[in-house]
Image: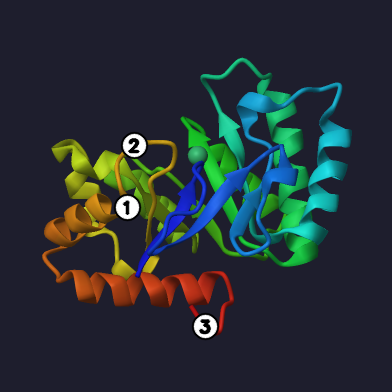
C-alpha cells in the first residue's frame, strides 16, 4: 500500500492518503483522512476568526489527522506579520488537540523554526513539498522535525538532499501535482537504492509513529 501524506485530490484506491482541505468541508467523506488548515495564500484578515471556527467545527465531523497545510510564504501577497499570527494560532490549536502539523514553507524556514520553538510546539511537524538545500534539510531535522518530498525528487537537482536524509525522517506526497504517488515512491527507492518493499515498510512505520496510529 502506498502512503500519500499530502494531496489536494480526493481518495484513490490502493493509496492511504491525507487530503488537504481549507474549506468546503461538507464534501469530506467520513471514510477518509484529512488535514485542515489555512494556507498563507488564503488568509483573509476579515474572515480568519470565522474560518478557524469553521475548521474547528469540521474537525468534529471528519477524520482530521493533521493540522495544515499552514506556515509562512515570503513570496505571497498576504502580509508576513499576519501570516505569522495565523501560523501561531495553528501551532496552539495543534498542541491543544495533539495533532501533527503539515507545514507550507517558502523562503521562511528560519522564521518557522523559531516560531515552533518560541510557541513550544509539542506535536510532530512535517515540512511538506521539500525542495531545498541539504543544509536547510539538516537544520529542520536537527530541530526534530520531518520532511515530505513530492515531485521535486523527480528532478536531479533535488536528489542529493533527498539521498542524505535519514529514512525515518521521510514522507512522500503528490501535493497538487499530476504525478502518481507510485512514481514518487519508485524514484525515492531508486535514489535511496532500496527496494520498494523496504521503502513501503519504512514510510508505514513513520506514518504510524507521527500520526499515532495503531493500524494502517
Ligand atoms: Zn499542498
- The location of residue 13, given as percent across then percent down, is 41, 60
Q: Which mark is drawn over residue 181?
A: 1
Q: Which residue occupies the extreme top position in the image? A: 77
Q: Nearer the viewer, residue 43 or 62?
A: 62
- The location of residue 57, given as percent across then percent down, is 85, 51
Query: Which residue is depicted at the point 86% across and 21% down?
Result: 46
Query: Which residue is depicted at the point 14% across and 56% down?
Result: 191
Q: Secondary structure at mark 2?
A: loop
Instruction: Specify which label sits upstream in the sequence, 2 or 3.
Output: 2
- Mark 1: few/some/many CA within 10 Å (<14, 14-19, 20+): many
Distance between mark 2 and mark 1 Cα atoms:
9 Å
- The location of residue 161, given as percent across then percent down, is 24, 49
Q: Which mark is drawn over residue 215?
A: 3
Tally of numbered discs: 3
Beta carbon of the mark 3 residue lies under 8 A of ligand 1? no
Residue denoted by label 2: 178
Indicate the quadrant where residue 112 lies: top right
- Mark 3: few/some/many CA within 10 Å (<14, 14-19, 20+): few
Amino acid at each position: 500500500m502506498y502512503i500519500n501524506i499530502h494531496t489536494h485530490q480526493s481518495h484513490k484506491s490502493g493509496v492511504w492518503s491525507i487530503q488537504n482541505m481549507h474549506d468546503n468541508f461538507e464534501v469530506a467523506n467520513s471514510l477518509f483522512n484529512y488535514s485542515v488548515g489555512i494556507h498563507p495564500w488564503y488568509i483573509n484578515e476579515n474572515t480568519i476568526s470565522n474560518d478557524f471556527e469553521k475548521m474547528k467545527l469540521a474537525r468534529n465531523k471528519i477524520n482530521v489527522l493533521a493540522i495544515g497545510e499552514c506556515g509562512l510564504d515570503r513570496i505571497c501577497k498576504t502580509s508576513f506579520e499576519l501570516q505569522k499570527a495565523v501560523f501561531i494560532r495553528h501551532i496552539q490549536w495543534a498542541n491543544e488537540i495533539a495533532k501533527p502539523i503539515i507545514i507550507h514553507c517558502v523562503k521562511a524556514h528560519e522564521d518557522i523554526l523559531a516560531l515552533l520553538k518560541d510557541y513550544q510546539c509539542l506535536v510532530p511537524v512535517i515540512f511538506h513539498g521539500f525542495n531545498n538545500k541539504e543544509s536547510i534539510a539538516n537544520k529542520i531535522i536537527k530541530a526534530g522535525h520531518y520532511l515530505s518530498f513530492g515531485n521535486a525528487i523527480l528532478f536531479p537537482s533535488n536528489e542529493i538532499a533527498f539521498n542524505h536524509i535519514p529514512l525515518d525522517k521521510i514522507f512522500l506526497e503528490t501535493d497538487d501535482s499530476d504525478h502518481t504517488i507510485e512514481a514518487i515512491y519508485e524514484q525515492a527507492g531508486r535514489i535511496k537504492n532500496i527496494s520498494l518493499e523496504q521503502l513501503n515498510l519504512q514510510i508505514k512505520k513513520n506514518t504510524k509513529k507521527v500520526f499515532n496510529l495503531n493500524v494502517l
